[in-house]
Image: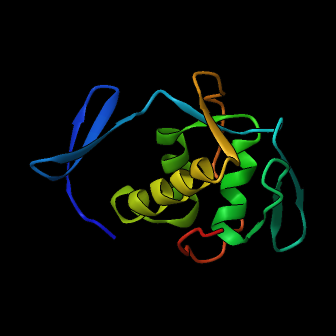
Amino acid sequence: MIKGEKSCFYDFFILKFDDNCAIVMSLKIFYTIDTSKVVFEKFEDETVLINLTSGNYYGTMNVGKAILTFLENGISFQNLLNIISTSYGKEIAEIEVDIQDFLTTLVNEGLVQITDLGSNEFSALENCNEYEKPLI
């Protein structure tokens, strides 16, 4: 995991890793499951996704499963952080890199797309277990 300096500016933030490398992350973009390329099924303790283009299967549990629930309708990074933070009783600083890494993996695997459409109407999850880093 790379740790860097974070600076916030209104509706985006910058993760700076060194003088030559920084990532600009908009807080107003939305992530959503790319249903034109992905099918998924929720089971009691796991969500399974299939990328129809590559044929690859993926599974995620706990926090990852919760995140996918919000991705169905589109959610901004900031809203997702707030919901997971509130639901699992963690500070945003404790989960931010985990959530961003998870979303980046989902995008890179062609499971999730970035869009400017989504909903800002979400509430915290109930009866959450202990927070664990989301993985696929």
Visible in this render: residue 125?
A: no
Q: Nearer the viewer, residue 87 or 34?
A: 34
Q: Residue furthest front?
A: 54
Q: Nearer the viewer, residue 78 or 110?
A: 110
Tell me which colouring the rendered structure shows: rainbow
Left or right position of 60 against 35: left
Visible in this render: residue 136?
A: yes
Q: Position of residue 40 (x, y in %)?
A: 86, 54
Q: Which residue corresponds to the image point at 85% horizontal and 49% vertical from the top-left?
A: 52
Left or right position of 88 against 36: left
Q: Is residue 40 above or below residue 24?
A: below
Q: Residue furthest left?
A: 19
Q: Position of residue 12 (x, y in %)?
A: 33, 31
Left or right position of 98 against 103: left
What is the quadrant of the C terminus in the image? bottom right
Q: Nearer the viewer, residue 83 or 67?
A: 67
Q: Which residue corresponds to the image point at 81% horizontal and 64% vertical from the top-left?
A: 47
Q: Position of residue 35 (x, y in %)?
A: 82, 38
Q: Which residue corresponds to the image point at 66% horizontal and 63% vertical from the top-left?
A: 64
Q: Nearer the viewer, residue 73 or 120?
A: 73
Left or right position of 83 against 136: left
What is the quadrant of the N terminus in the image? bottom left
Q: Is residue 35 above or below residue 5?
A: above
Q: Residue furthest top?
A: 116
Q: Which residue corresponds to the image point at 55% horizontal and 52% vertical from the top-left?
A: 103
The mark tally for this picture is 0
